[in-house]
Structure formats: C-alpha cells, structure tokens
Image (cartoon, rainbow, N blue to C red):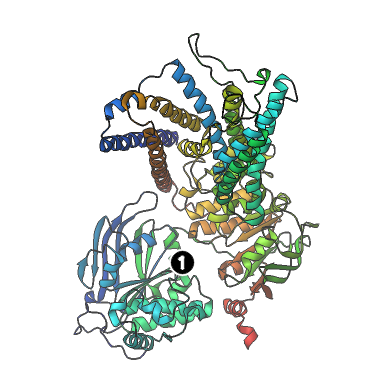
Amino acid sequence: MSDARLKRVALAIGAPALALIIAFAITSLVLILAGDSVIGVWQQILSVPDVRGVTNILNAATVYYLSAVAVAIGFRMSLFNIGVDGQYRIASFVAAIVAGEAWLPGYLNTLLALVAAVLVGALWAGIAGLLRVTRGVSEVISTIMLNAIATAVVAYLLRKAAVDAEGSNITATKDIPEGSWIPGFSLGSDAPNDVYGVIVVAVVVGFVYWLVINRTRFGFDLRATGASESAAIASGIDVKRMVLVSMLLSGAVAGLVGMPILFGDAHNYGSTFQSGLGFAGIAIALLGRNHPVGIALGALLFAFLDEQANPLQILLDVSPDIVKITQGVIVLTVVIAYEVVRRYGVRLEQRLVASALADDDTDDKGAEVKV
Amino acid sequence: MGPSPCFVVHDPLEPAEKHTDVTTTTRADDIVVRLRDIGKNFPGVIANHDVNIDVAKGTVHAIVGENGAGKSTLMKTLYGVQKPDSGTIEIHGRTVTLSSPADAINAGVGMVFQHFMLADNLTVLENVVLGAEKLHGIGAGARKEITRLSDAYGLAIDPDVLVEELGVGSRQRIEILKVLYRGASIIILDEPTAVLVPQEVDELFANLRDLKAEGLAVIFISHKLDEVLSVADTVTVIRRGTTVDTVEADSVDSRRLAEMMVGAELPSPSTESSTVTDDVALEIRDLRLEAAGRELCADINLTIHRGEILGIAGVEGNGQAELVESIMGMRSGVTGSVVLGGRDMAGSSTRERRDSGIGYIPEDRHRHGLLLDSPLWENRILGHQTTGDAGRRIFIDRARAREETQAIVEKYDVRTPGIDTLARALSGGNQQKLIIGREMSGDPVLLIAAHPTRGVDVGAQAAIWGHIKQARRDGLAVLLISADLDELIGLSDTIEVILRGRLVGTFDPATVTPEQLGTAMTGAGDAA
C-alpha cells in the first residue's frame, strides 16, 4: 500500500514537472517563430536572481499566494470565485481609507484596517454567495459582474476620497501614517529593498487554510460538498449554508490580497494600485492543485518568471510579455497532466484491488457467502 | 409458435438451403456463435479468460453470473465494443474480427441494452430507421418492413405512435425490433427483465419464444435464475471471468445454478421467527410531498415497530425515492408528521434526523452514499460527521476514523487492499458492504435500506441480507425499499405497495404471491 502511495506522490510531482517542460518548449517555439533569440531569453529567465530580485520575487509571490488561497477555498467545494480581483480591490480601497484616516494610533490602526479589508472582501463575495443560494445565480456570472461593479465603485469613490498631491496627476487616498506601516525585513545588509512583513500573514493564512480544510469537520463538510453535492446532502450537510460560508471565507482571504502592497509599499490606494492579481490567483490555484504547499510553489514560480522577464526588453528587445505565454501554457498543460495522472491513479488503484481480491480468493474460496 | 421455417430471410449470411429442425438437440452446424478461449485483460476489473461458449440457432441461451463475473466484458467483446486479447469468435461458421458494433451488426449480432436508447419525441418508425435509413428508406418501405417484422415475431408494434406514449414493455419490444430491422439473427439481451413487472416479463418471454421459433439465436443475460430457467434452453455460468459450465435448462434448478455461480451453498432470504415488538420506532402520518405543483407522495401512513422490517414494493418511479427523501429531510414541501422514537422530526434537518438515529442506505450509492474519489476512511465519516466518535469535536479524529474503518472492513467483509483505497476502486458489492457497516456503526433506531442489493453480486447479496436480518434481530426498525420481489417477500414482516405516490395495499409476505404484488404495483386491480 505504501508502495502505491509512493507512486502517487511521484506522479503528483512528475506531472507538473512534465507540464513545465512542455510549456517551456511551446514558449521556445513562439520565440523561434517570432525570430527572437531563444537561448538569450532562457539564459536571462533561468539565471540566478540577485538579492534585489529575490526580494521582489518573494513580495510578488506573497500577493499571488493570498490570491490563490482565496480562489482555492472556492475550488475545494466546486465554487468558481472569479471575483477575487474585484474583492481585493474594493477591500484594499476601504482599508486604505480606514488606515489613512488613522482613527486609532499605530498598529491598532493597522489591525482595524486589516479587519475592514477582510470584512469588505467577505461581504463583496457574500453578495455572489447569497445570489447563488437564494436565486440560483451562478457564482461565475455574478462574480464577473461584481468585478466590473467594483471597478466602477472604486473609481467613483476614489475621486471623492482622493487628496490632491502637489505636482502629480496620480489620484490616491490619503497616505497611511508611518506608524501604521507594516515593517519589512531585508535579506542581507546589501539588500536595497525589503521583503513585505505581511509575508508572515500569508504563511499563517496558508497554515490555517490547510488545518481547516484537512483537519476539521467544517473542512470535511466543505470537501464533501465539493466532491459530491448529492452525497453531501444525503449525509446531512446543509449545502446552501456551505456555499454561503465558503464564499464569505474566500472573499475574506481575497480582502487580504492587497495588504502587502498597501502596508509595505504603496501606503495609499491610488489609480496605479496593482490590478489583475485575482486572475493570476486562479491560475496559481490550479497549478498548485489547491494544496497550500503546491500553491506556494506555483506563486513562487509565477513571481520568478515575472521578475526574470523584466529586463528582457532592455537586454534583448524582447517583450517581457513572453512569460505570460509561458504562464498561460503552464496552466493548460498542468490541468491536462493532472487529469491524465488522476485517471492513471484510479486505474492503478483498481488494479491493486483486483490483485488483492485475487490473492484473497486463493486462500478462502467462497467465503463471501457466510450468513 | 406455428410451424418453423428453417432459414432466416433477412440474414444474408445464412445459406437458405440449410435445413435444421428446431429442437433442443443441437448439431454442430446449428452453432451460430462459437467463442473459443476468449481472453481479455483489463486493469481493475476481473478479466475474461478461457471463455468457451456455443450458441445454437433457434435457442435462448442464457448467460448467468455474479455482477463483476465478466458477463458484460464478454458481451462487449461479442458486440464489437472491444477486441479480445486472445481467442476466436466464429459467427455462422466464419471466424470474424469485430472492431466496432457496426462490424457486429454486419455479422448479424444485435444487442438490446438494459437502458433503452429511444427518442421520446419521435415515432416508433422514426426511432427504428434512425441510423439505418439506407436499409428500407424512411417511408413506406420502412413501415412495411416494420409491420412485417412485428407480425412475424408477434411484437404488436404500431409504427406510427409516439414513443413517449408507450410503456416500458413496448419500448423494449421496439429495441428488439430495431435490432431485427438491422438484420440481426443473433440477439443479445442485457438484463431485459430488470425494468419489467411480472406481467411484462411473461410477454417478453412469449416474444423470445417466437424469436427462437423463427430460427434466431437469443443470448439472454440475467441475474434472475428462475426467469432464466423458465425461458432458456441452455445456460452458461460465468464465474470470475471464465465459463464454469454449460447445462441444459431442464436439467438444473435455480439453487444449483446459483451454487455454480458463487461456487458455494446459497443462502435463502427467508425470515426466521418474528422479532416484531410493540415498540413503535417510526410513525408516519399523512405525509405528503409536493414539488413544482405536482403531488409526488400523498396520504402516506405507516408504522414500523422495533424488530420489524417493512417492505415497500412498487414499480420504479412511483414515489419510493421521494418518500425516502422526505423521511430523511432532504426534500422541501413535505407536510405531515414523521415521528421517530416518539420525537416529531417535522422541520428537522437531515443531520438532526441522522443524529436522532436514522441509518440510510441510499438507492444510488454513487450519487448519495459515497465520495468516490476519497479514501474509504473518509467515506466512513460521511453522514456521521456529528454522530460518530471520529467527528464529534471541531477537529476530525483521523486515527479514530481509520480504526473504525478498519473494524468495518473486517466485520462486514469489505474486500479491499486497505482503507486508503479510493471508494471508486471497489466493486459495487464491497462499496455497499462499507455503506451498511458505516450506517450500522451509528447504532441507529431506524434503518432505511433503498434497493440494498441492487447491482451487487450474489455473494454480497447474501451477506447484505444477513446484515439486514441481524439488524432486525437487534431490534432495529427497517424500512426496506426494493424492486426485487423475492427480496421483499423473503425479508419483510409486512409489505406495503406504493403506486403513484400512495400506499395502495398491505400484504403479508407469508401468503402473498409475486403475481398479487405485480397486480397491485401496476394498478391492474383498480381497473377490474
């Protein structure tokens, strides 16, 4: 049995590795077709990043990680929360306002803003959950709509809440007082930049996610609902309640996505606040198979590719967007590879059962009939 | 039926001058299907090996065996769905390679599946010609051929009625006609009686006798041994992927056949002395279920005492599933009272009902009973998140759940390499044994068993019957829903018949006959 388990683990690692190689091959093909230097591009992308680069990768990965965990919570019960993007933007905006107003001193202010972000993210996702539970509206549709609405609402309110910065055409909320920033840490004395302090929050979120999903009764109910809604109903799980609760949780984590940037870098919410993180989260959650460690690896990979591609324009006159192709293809190949491996795993399992039964049969013929 | 013309008109492969008399004695040149040493390896399912079968024309040849014994693998091989790894298939004396069902049809082999493949909104004619338009066109020629076949084989089919207006028996005859229309002289019927009530079974058997009288060969796959004996001329028994023996039907009885199938003595489902007490475990009063303006159950009144098995008989789709789901609290729109052990459960959630002591063996174990892609020990928790010791607190006690699963696997003889095996990998009978073990482990007051032995092999069936009888002896109230009348009669203390969502009659299993039940189930008694 442990042999089979070992095989399963090997497959689980082998599949994404193979997918990665295929994705690199396809990217190379695109480069060749476009007449760009294949070797030059890979030399740059696969080079060892410096301290500054490593810091950037960790920071970007922190943000990706939170986004992917938010998506993964939904995935674990077959809910497709496409709305993480809108949820984190509206949550970051509200958190920026709260922190900027500084009603409370120092870190109490930070804490209040974080709570506000979590609540707003949960509420925004909760709208989709409520619509699904009461009216049967697909959460895919409603979260896409809510993304658009979030964009509009934030743009509208930002104009009202913005403070005019001298000599700048950037619209942004009031800066967070320095006493409420979350300090980072540097990776060495010569590092020019800091790793976000919120990375600790991301690690905690990842651990709690694992603990709740895999070890608690609530997590069991959630996974059971995701695996088979009909079986969940028959087992006594209130599926509607689960849909609503997991949407709220997914939104709550989505609310945290913008926090590393807000408290570690930007210190306000402006029109240049990073967008599109929610969609990257979907890809990374798929890549990491909704597993907390897998998601972390996926987030690091995506952040690594982003960071390493940055100088391509200057060095080789190749658009850094080439890695977007790589990232996209990785997601596709990985999904296919996982499905192939899953089917193979089931067959392997069935063969094991068959052989175990055949062994059984030789030593106790006809023992099936004993009443 | 009538004198037997000895050649098959619509079979181009059959030489017309070949004369045979249709009797049970077979000569070598009567053999239309000859399977020799067929082997098929498959990961996960029991493979076929050394399968040898001779089917003679003008006979009904039954193939019996437990579920998973390899019948369907064999039939797929004969119908061209899959190629055998070894061995030869001879049809009408020629060695053939069947790579697709089209090849099989061209060779004269047709198959009628258990689940009909008919378009409800088309007429019989349209359904029959669909995909075979080249044979006789789609108009008068086709109608003439259908009428001719219908008359020749006594199928009584009107080509111009809509299929949606027809009952199950007629639909099955259309499927047979479809196969004949395509020129088959060898017809495979896969569990044809599973969907029929007793009267329809008789009609089907009359049709089969007509078919063989016309010189066709019918291969009849079934579990139901009494039926096999009443219609078949020859019976081949398959066990663990290989043919055990072929016998003349009039030389064996069903007990002997069953013993050949399981390779051991067969237990009967008959109930021992009554254990019924005066203690009411479940009382249902005026239960009514309405959904989307349609009344699915009404005026349901029943009482089950501790130590009593109440059987519900009925043709599928008459409200059994809805009744069970109403009792389980899985439906909205239920009125009336469900009192379990003196406590009215009206308005309670499914989880509250389970916690109050209802064990539930669902009708569709894949949809309602298991998480197929989860390991067995996680499946042990399902439905017992709050009742079992494993899940009483916030955290799931995995060690405990694993221990309990191991205990269930041992006590209920679940054949599995281990408790980390995915539920999907187990055979139907072993999945069901796991479910029963799980539901019994919660010390229920009431056990609802919906079709507990459906799709499980004879060995597991016997074990499951044993567990239900044990539950009764232990003082549980059991609500048994089944389509297998022998099972109902053998296990129940009382039988209620359900028809169109209402209970229409109470029978004593000691005196009732399958025919009486069949009449009540179809409502034939009302018309008289």
How many other residues sit within 10 Å of disc 1, few (<14), some (14-19) or many (≥20)?
A: many
Amino acid at circle 1: His
B134 to B339, vertically: above or below: below
A110 sits to left or right of B202? right
- Residue sitting nearer the eye, A143 or B149: A143
- Residue sitting nearer the eye, B129 or A307: A307
Q: Visible in this render: residue B31? A: yes
Give the farthest residue toward the top. Answer: A189
A86 sits to left or right of B113? right
- Residue sitting nearer the eye, A243 or B74: A243
Q: Quadrant of residue A8?
A: top left
B120 to B311, vertically: above or below: below
Q: Position of residue B107 (x, y in %)?
A: 25, 71
Residue pointed to by mark 1: B223
Give the farthest residue toward the right. Answer: B342
Q: Which quarter of the rendering shows the N terminus of chain B?
A: bottom left
Q: Position of residue A204 (x, y in %)?
A: 60, 26
Q: Which quarter of the rendering shows the C terminus of chain B?
A: bottom right
Q: Position of residue A177 (x, y in %)?
A: 67, 20
Mark 1 element type: loop
A92 to A134, vertically: above or below: above
Residue found 39% across the figure and 75% down from its top: B232
- Residue sitting nearer the eye, B264 or B334: B334
Chain containing the residue with disc 1: B
Give the farthest residue toward the front. Answer: A167
Q: Quadrant of residue B103?
A: bottom left
Q: Visible in this render: residue A217? A: no
Q: Position of residue A200 (x, y in %)?
A: 59, 23
